[in-house]
Image (spheres, rainbow, N blue to C red):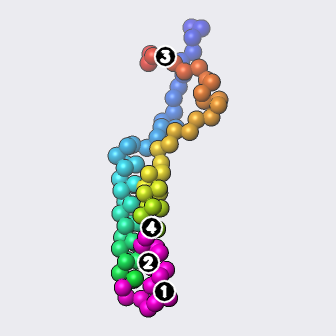
Amino acid sequence: MGKEKKVFEITTAPSALTRDQAGRQKRYFISMMIRTACFLLTVILPSPYRWFALLGAVTLPYFAVVIANAGRETISTREDVLKDKPLAIE
């Protein structure tokens, strides 16, 4: 009677790994399609605008990878680290 059971809420659970990976793949795919459009615009556009399209085509892969890899970080506050955690599932 003296020991109180902890209740965990499902709303604090992270999203499923497959759903997270699908979202990342979709963001990366969209970024690469924009990059492809930038390469095509580099060929089609006149000179001053061509350089902006080429700059987008060259720099977009870096940002696409950073954006695609963002997510599922586990950032814990000091209070979370210091709380008593159960050693086993009861």
Residue flagged by tag 1: what amino acid is it?
Answer: Tyr
Asked if disc 4 and disc 1 are in contact, CB closer than 8 Å, the reply is no
Dividing the image into 4 quarters, which one contains the C terminus? top left
User: Which is more foreground, mark 1 or mark 3?
Assistant: 1
Residue flagged by tag 2: what amino acid is it?
Answer: Leu
Q: Which residue is mark 2?
A: 54
Magenta-highlighted residues: 43-58
Q: Secondary structure at mark 1?
A: helix
Identify the image quadrant of residue 68.
bottom left
Sequence order check: which comes first, mark 1 or mark 3? Answer: 1
Q: Which residue is mark 4?
A: 60
Q: Secondary structure at mark 4?
A: helix
Residue 56 spot, x, y in % from top left? 46, 73
Residue 14 spot, x, y in % from top left? 46, 40
Q: Nearer the viewer, residue 17 or 89?
A: 17
Instruction: For label 4, count other residues whose C-alpha is less than 10 Å away and answer few (under 14), some (14-19) or many (20+).
Output: some
Sequence order check: which comes first, mark 4 or mark 1? Answer: 1
Q: Which residue is mark 1?
A: 49
